[in-house]
Amino acid sequence: MPIILAFIKAFWKPILVITTIIVLILSARIYASRQYDAGVNDATATFQEKLNKLNADQQKQMAEASKRYQEQKTIRDKNQEIQYVEVEKIVQQPVYLTDCIDADGLREINSAAASK
């Protein structure tokens, strides 16, 4: 122990300078690290805000597209219903008038078509 005290007494000024330099370097590194982390956090927050805005815009566009699709689907379904009603009323006369079917079959088909 007396050797360490003698060493410190002999070189106290260089030890103080080296210790001060080490403390200053460590302080500067800690400060720079905190500044870097703050910058990263700010950039992340800004980027997240932009992503949220883009996401909201995209959701809005998707909702509008879905609304247009539903409107077009409603119109298309309505037109199909009208077509189905019109198609049912077309057959009103006997259809088979050839010799391919015997007389009894032709009579049954004509009576079925006439009864509608």
Image (cartoon, rainbow, N blue to C red):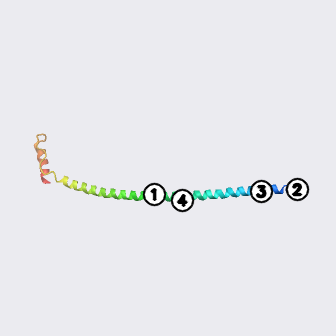
Q: Amino acid at mark 2?
A: Ala
| Farthest right residue in view | 2
Q: Secondary structure at mark 3?
A: helix
What quarter of the picture does the N terminus occupy?
Answer: bottom right
Residue 8 on image: x %, y %:
85, 56
Tell which circle, 2 or 3, labels the residue nearer the N-terminal end: 2
For the residues labelled 4 and 3, the Cα–Cα distance comes to 39 Å
Q: Amino acid at mark 1?
A: Asn
| Horizontal arrangement in the rendering, residue 8 relative to residue 43 (left or right) | right
| Farthest top residue in view | 100
Q: Which residue is mark 4?
A: 45
For the residues labelled 2 and 1, the Cα–Cα distance comes to 70 Å
Q: Which residue is mark 1?
A: 55
Of badges 4 and 1, the one in the foreground is: 4
Neighbours of disc 2 within 10 Å: few (<14), some (14-19), many (20+): few
Tell which circle, 1 or 3, labels the residue nearer the N-terminal end: 3
Q: Which residue is mark 3?
A: 19
Of badges 2 and 1, the one in the foreground is: 2
What quarter of the picture does the C terminus occupy?
Answer: bottom left
Q: Quadrant of residue 19?
A: bottom right
Neighbours of disc 1 within 10 Å: few (<14), some (14-19), many (20+): few
Q: Amino acid at mark 3?
A: Thr
Query: Contact (CB < 8 A) between labels 2 and 4?
Result: no
